[in-house]
Image (cartoon, rainbow, N blue to C red):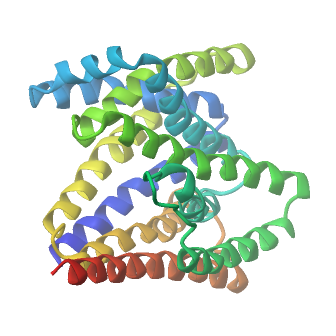
Amino acid sequence: MKAILLGLTAALFFSVTFVLNRSMELSGGHWAWSASLRYFFMLPMLIVIVAAQNRLRPVFHHLRSRPAEWLLWSTVGFGLFYAPLAFSTVYGPGWLVAATFQITIIAGSLLVPFLHKTPGLKQRIPLQSVLISLVILTGVFIMQAEHASAVPLLNVWLCVLPLLLAAFAYPLGNRKMMHIAGNGLTTFQRVLGMTIASMPFWVILALYGASVHGLPGRSQISQSFIVAVSSGIIATVLFFYATELVKNDTAKLAGVEATQSGEVLFALIGEMLLLHTAAPSVLTFSGMALVLAGMILHSLRAALAARKIKTADI
């Protein structure tokens, strides 16, 4: 129960990203600043955390050893993930962005043959995962169809297409970097390294934001700082701690991972309370329920698969 509560708390802090990104958009802030400021704020905080653990030097050693790969895949995993995510909030509410981004689970399954290459073993797309993912995809389609009835079709595409890019970039970049870093870095060290390596992207994006919009206002700066602390630090620490508590029990681990489906509900509640967003229709709620059910089924399937492997080893 402790791990589940920690997982739900992490989901709550993760959902702050979607709510405040939408808030910054509605208050006149530019999406390019919303995206870049988060990573500008995260960088010094991550340096302090890793330095406090006396683990700073290995990060720079890894960066120097394979700079091109760090630059490329960090830009994909962080830049092409979060910039489109921030852009999509221009054309859709935060809860809809949060729900649609769960397509990343499907993307992760489709990328398996390309990311997990074992000599002599042909990797296949896990069909069970794809079938479960269809539940999520159906839910997203229902919500976006309902959204399309209230806004121009172009706005729907400008919300969905960036999220499709983000959904594939996130697992692609992060899994590539996990392979490149190997077991030589902890999670915080790897996140710090990716943040450093993606800085050129964020600087260019900030310059773009300055050229088309000007400098960010005080409100956008403060809200971006909250996003960096809430999602980038607090939520990450809570979620990793929750998974650490149950790492030896696959069923409990699946339960903790399933708590992240709460981001969608928390984002919806947050927008209704803070931004006075109207409650979605019954049809939209049904789509949201399918997304949540699909995420939970994914976690259960992963737990059963892990338990099967463990039993076979015994």
Q: Nearer the viewer, residue 246 or 73?
A: 73
Residue positioned 36% across, 42% down in the render: 178
Vertical arrangement, residue 75 with respect to residue 163, above or below: above
**Would residue 76 appear left or right of 42 to someone viewing this image?**
right
Q: Is residue 118 visible?
A: yes
Q: Quadrant of the N terminus?
A: bottom left
Vertical arrangement, residue 12 with respect to residue 59, above or below: below
**Would residue 49 appear left or right of 143 to someone viewing this image?**
left
Q: Position of residue 275 (x, y in %)?
A: 58, 56
Q: Position of residue 78 (x, y in %)?
A: 50, 36
Which of the 4 quarters of the picture holds residue 97? bottom right
Report the residue that reaches farthest toward the front: 120
Residue positioned 45% across, 70% down in the render: 261
Count of numbered circles on the image: 0
Vertical arrangement, residue 16 with respect to residue 289, above or below: above
Q: Position of residue 54 (x, y in %)?
A: 9, 25
Q: Position of residue 38 (x, y in %)?
A: 45, 32
Which of the 4 quarters of the picture holds residue 192? top left
Q: Quadrant of the C terminus?
A: bottom left
Q: Nearer the viewer, residue 256 or 70?
A: 70
Q: Is residue 20 visible?
A: no
**Would residue 195 appear left or right of 268 to someone viewing this image?**
left
